[in-house]
């Protein structure tokens, strides 16, 4: 029997994987891809050094620096489900990209290094997940190394992130003595060394939580300690609450070691039991349920140029929110009213692409774009207008003057800037009268990537003059008097020609507010 739209949507699980750099996000992603048979061999970060890169880390600059700069999208078929994994850059200078990616998913997986606990970047990203109220699953990684006490980690997670935690399993030892996990959810023990216990990967537990049968591990104090910890958790910990998980108020916690592949599949199996399928999305016209509308709708959360030097093109990433995509479908771009035929589309396996035959809510498709689309655009099929809620925009904090080195090459400079700005890689301002170019970013690394890409992709060499950190505040056009500008509050316009002041510091801003109490200063997020 043919699958209905509802059947299809229910098989989708779309999540973003977030972490502080080096916690093991890439390694886990590779493991997940392996389970789905998506790639034959998981490249390890060791491979990075020998010139072999992880599938999700494909941009040249990422390879040089060994960090993920942009989010990529991967698909895995697993247990009759289609799992869409959105990788995010761990480095905080690229958090804008991550925040927007979080708007396109239905749940998030947070990876924590057991040796480090909650790191600043995790905290920041986590806040956005909380804002969105999406379920968050926690994987505490690197148990094959000596790390911090699991009880401490759980306490820190709850305290720092202000979320309740429920351990789905509990580590039995760590480092050299990592014997496995005491799997509360599946009522079994999972062993790192099956060969030492009658070649069993798993041993079932009895009603009292003890391993059924006699094995070398039952003599181990590490195992009895884990059992005691779990008893304590049972008594003093949070109760399991599916609704609280769905609302993002309780995070199920898993332990494992991505590098050795231990605990990752156990995590995945539990994840699919609780992760939501595509949920309703907010629009200006009310909530839109993924299957309530046969017409295709979606929004653009990311634009990327020249992902693969062999293709030299620009791809807009669209999250489908309702209906079913089929090649050749006609849609309208809400912002401009322009009509588009979506015939040239792609699905992702990081650096390899396949054309899309069918896609439903939860799926991410790539649209080859010639400059019609912008981040945040809503696309809809049919006559009924749809506008999804706006994506968060961030107030840049760092600024840089930029000029082309070679005046003969102004054309490629303008083209490059325009495209990279539309991609959302960086923000562009101009001084109000003299129209000098100023770039705004959240993190320093964004400038470096900009400069690198301008040179590599547009053959344009630039001079960059740092202006340091500033406070950007927008004002209404009608409030503007050009005499308000001074050396400590530079008047600029953004790329939509809205007036914006770049204040030297808080003091300069307060001075301005006192002087012009009737002018309202606005910031982005
Ligand atoms: P990302 O920056 O979060 O994507 O982290 P990676 O997946 O690139 O991993 C960072 C480093 O930690 C690499 O050297 C990995 O080999 C290592 N790593 C990842 N997972 C584990 C693990 O479970 N155990 C150990 N010992 N190392 C790990």
Image (tube, rainbow, N blue to C red):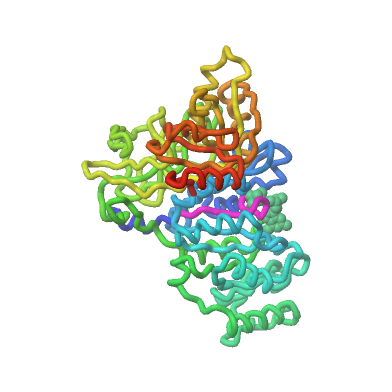
Horizontally, residue 329 falls left or right of residue 308, namely left
Can you tell which quarter of the image residue 117 is in?
bottom right
Decide: is 518 above or below 119.
above
Q: Position of residue 389 (x, y in %)?
A: 37, 50
Residue 490 % position (x, y): 55, 34
Q: Residue at x 54, y 74 (%)?
A: 185
Q: Residue at x 61, y 53 (%)?
A: 25
Q: Residue at x 54, y 27 (%)?
A: 437
Q: Is residue 76 visible?
A: no
Quadrant of the image containing the N terminus: bottom left
Q: Which residue extends farthest front?
A: 515
How many marks overall?
0
Q: Nearer the viewer, residue 164 or 366?
A: 164
Pinpoint residue 124: horizontal percent, then vertical percent: 58, 55
Per the rendered image, the range of residues in magenta is 14-27
Residue 15 position (above or below residue 315): below
Residue projecting furthest to the bottom: 208
The quarter holding residue 206 reads bottom right
Specify whether 375 is left or right of 257.
Answer: left
Q: Is residue 405 visible?
A: yes
Is residue 371 covered in magenta?
A: no
Task: Say which of 316 and 510 sits in front.
Answer: 510
């Amino acid at each position: 029997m043919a699958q209905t739209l509802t059947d299809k949507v229910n098989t989708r699980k779309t999540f973003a994987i977030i972490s502080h750099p080096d916690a093991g996000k890439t390694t886990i992603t590779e493991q997940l891809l392996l389970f789905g048979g998506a790639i034959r061999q998981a490249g390890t970060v060791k491979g990075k050094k020998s010139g072999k890169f992880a599938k999700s880390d494909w941009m040249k600059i990422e390879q040089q620096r060994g960090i993920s700069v942009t989010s990529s999208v991967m698909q895995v078929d697993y247990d009759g489900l289609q799992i869409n994994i959105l990788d995010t850059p761990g480095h905080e200078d690229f958090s804008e990209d991550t925040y927007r990616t979080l708007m396109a998913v239905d749940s998030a997986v947070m990876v924590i290094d057991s040796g480090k606990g909650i790191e600043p970047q995790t905290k920041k990203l986590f806040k956005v997940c909380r804002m969105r109220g999406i379920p968050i699953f926690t994987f505490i990684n690197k148990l094959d190394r000596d790390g911090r006490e699991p009880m401490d980690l759980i306490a820190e997670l709850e305290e720092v992130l202000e979320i309740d935690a429920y351990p789905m399993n509990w580590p039995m030892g760590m480092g050299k003595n990592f014997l496995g996990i005491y799997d509360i959810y599946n009522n079994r023990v999972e062993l790192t060394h099956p060969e030492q216990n009658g070649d069993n990967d798993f041993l079932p537990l009895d009603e009292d939580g003890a391993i059924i049968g006699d094995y070398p591990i039952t003599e181990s104090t590490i195992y009895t300690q884990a059992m005691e910890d779990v008893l304590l958790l049972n008594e003093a910990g949070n109760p399991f609450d599916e609704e609280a998980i769905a609302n993002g108020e309780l995070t199920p916690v898993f332990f494992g070691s991505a590098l050795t592949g231990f605990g990752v599949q156990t995590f995945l199996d539990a994840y699919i039991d609780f992760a939501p399928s595509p949920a309703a999305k907010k629009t200006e016209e009310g909530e839109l349920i993924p299957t309530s509308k046969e017409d295709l709708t979606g929004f653009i959360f990311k634009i990327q140029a020249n992902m693969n030097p062999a293709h030299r093109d620009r791809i807009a990433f669209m999250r489908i929110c309702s209906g079913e995509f089929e090649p050749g479908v006609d849609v309208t771009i809400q912002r401009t009213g322009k009509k588009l035929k979506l015939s040239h589309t792609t699905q992702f396996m990081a650096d390899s692409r396949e054309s899309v035959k069918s896609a439903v809510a939860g799926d991410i498709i790539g649209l080859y774009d010639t400059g019609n689309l912008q981040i945040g655009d809503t696309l809809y099929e049919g006559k009924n207008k749809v506008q999804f809620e706006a994506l968060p925009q961030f107030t840049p904090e760092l600024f840089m003057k930029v000029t082309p080195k070679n005046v003969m090459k102004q054309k490629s400079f303008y083209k490059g800037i325009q495209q990279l700005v539309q991609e959302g890689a960086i923000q562009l301002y101009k001084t109000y009268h003299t129209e000098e170019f100023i770039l705004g970013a959240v993190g320093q690394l964004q400038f470096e990537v900009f400069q690198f890409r301008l040179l590599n992709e547009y053959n344009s060499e630039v001079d960059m003059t740092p202006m340091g950190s500033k406070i950007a505040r927008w004002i209404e056009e009608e409030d503007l008097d050009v005499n308000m500008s001074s050396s400590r509050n530079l008047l600029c316009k953004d790329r939509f020609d809205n007036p914006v002041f770049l204040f030297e510091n808080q003091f300069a801003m307060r001075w301005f507010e006192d002087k012009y109490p009737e002018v309202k200063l606005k910031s982005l997020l």
